[in-house]
């Protein structure tokens, strides 16, 4: 009974809008606040996102991506000031890496804030990032500061690296694609969990694991 199917999204007409247009960003932010799914550029690959506190929209995101419900949805933030809205705590090493790598391709997993919908992750952790992309941050800020976001593709398919690739993957499944041309990155962000006593690299991306772990060694040894 936990399976979802995006039937209700099949009749959406997807609009491709320029990410450089401030009005397009504002219009897309309104759609996010209304529960729509939208695609936008980041500093890594394109993302498909929904409002972070809209449980129905989050479940629709799982359905559209055909993503297993036991794989949590990361949250993208616009500003450091919004961190306390989505995280219950920031461990010391996580804060050090935030200071070093944000905005940028580092996703941290920390204890999640109790106000977040249960559907966003199946456990006590939440994955968070501030992307180094002005259009993405402008959209996130205009929509309320936090978007539950996954890569713009169907599960087990390559992530979209342009608006056109996102359109090929998600046409008629999302309301808007903000097109910013080819993405500067070619792979998703590095993911590090700070839920245990020591940081654990879950997925290596643009930031190599050695940089994070050597940073940890220097800090603890000093």
Image (spheres, grey):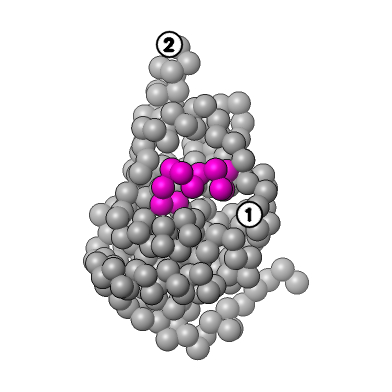
Residue under pointer 1: 116
Q: Quadrant of the N terminus?
A: bottom right
Asked if 206 appears above or below 64 in the picture, the reply is: above
**Numbered circle sitting on residue 89:** none
How far apart are the alpha carbons under marks 1 and 2? Answer: 37 Å
Residue under pointer 2: 222
**Magenta span includes 211:** no
* Residue in the image at 53% along x and 82% along y: 9
Q: Residue 27 sits in which quadrant?
A: bottom left
Closer-to-camera residue (197/159): 197
**Is residue 179 visible in this depiction of the protein?**
no
**Magenta span includes 80:** yes
* Residue in the image at 56% along x and 48% along y: 85
Image x and y of residue 90, in percent: 55, 34
* Residue in the image at 43% along x and 11% along y: 222
Image x and y of residue 205, in percent: 38, 44
**Is residue 141 visible in this depiction of the protein?**
yes
Tell me if mark 1 has few (under 14), some (14-19) or many (20+) residues whose alpha carbon lies within 10 angstroms of its own: some
Image x and y of residue 3, in percent: 68, 71
Relative to 154, is 22 on the left or the right?
left
Relative to 168, is 200 on the left or the right?
right
Of tags 1 and 2, the one toward the viewer is 1
Relative to 23, is 154 on the left or the right?
right
Asked if 218 appears above or below 106 in the picture, the reply is: above
How many numbered marks have been drawn onto this rendered protein structure?
2
Q: Which residues are magenta?
A: 77-87
Asked if 195 appears above or below 66 in the picture, the reply is: above
Relative to 169, is 20 on the left or the right?
left
Overall secondary structure of the magenta section:
helix
């Amino acid at each position: 009974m936990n399976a979802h199917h995006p039937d209700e999204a099949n009749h959406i007409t997807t609009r491709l809008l320029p990410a450089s247009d401030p009005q397009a960003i504002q219009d897309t932010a309104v759609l996010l606040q209304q529960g729509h799914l939208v695609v936008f550029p980041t500093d890594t690959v394109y993302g498909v996102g929904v409002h972070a506190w809209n449980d129905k929209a989050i479940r629709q995101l799982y359905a559209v991506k055909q993503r297993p419900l036991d794989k949590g949805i990361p949250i993208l933030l616009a500003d450091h000031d919004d961190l306390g809205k989505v995280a219950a705590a920031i461990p010391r090493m996580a804060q050090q890496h935030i200071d070093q790598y944000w905005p940028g391709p580092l996703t941290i997993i920390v204890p999640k804030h109790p106000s977040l919908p249960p559907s966003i992750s199946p456990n006590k952790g939440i994955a968070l990032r501030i992307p180094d992309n002005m259009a993405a941050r402008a959209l996130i800020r205009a929509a309320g500061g936090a978007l539950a976001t996954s890569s713009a593709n169907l599960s087990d398919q390559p992530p979209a690296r342009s608006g056109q690739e996102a359109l090929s993957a998600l046409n008629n499944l999302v309301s808007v694609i903000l097109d910013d041309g080819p993405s500067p990155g070619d792979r998703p962000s590095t993911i590090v969990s700070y839920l245990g006593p020591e940081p654990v690299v879950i997925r290596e991306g643009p930031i190599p694991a050695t940089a994070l772990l050597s940073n940890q060694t220097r800090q603890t040894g000093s």
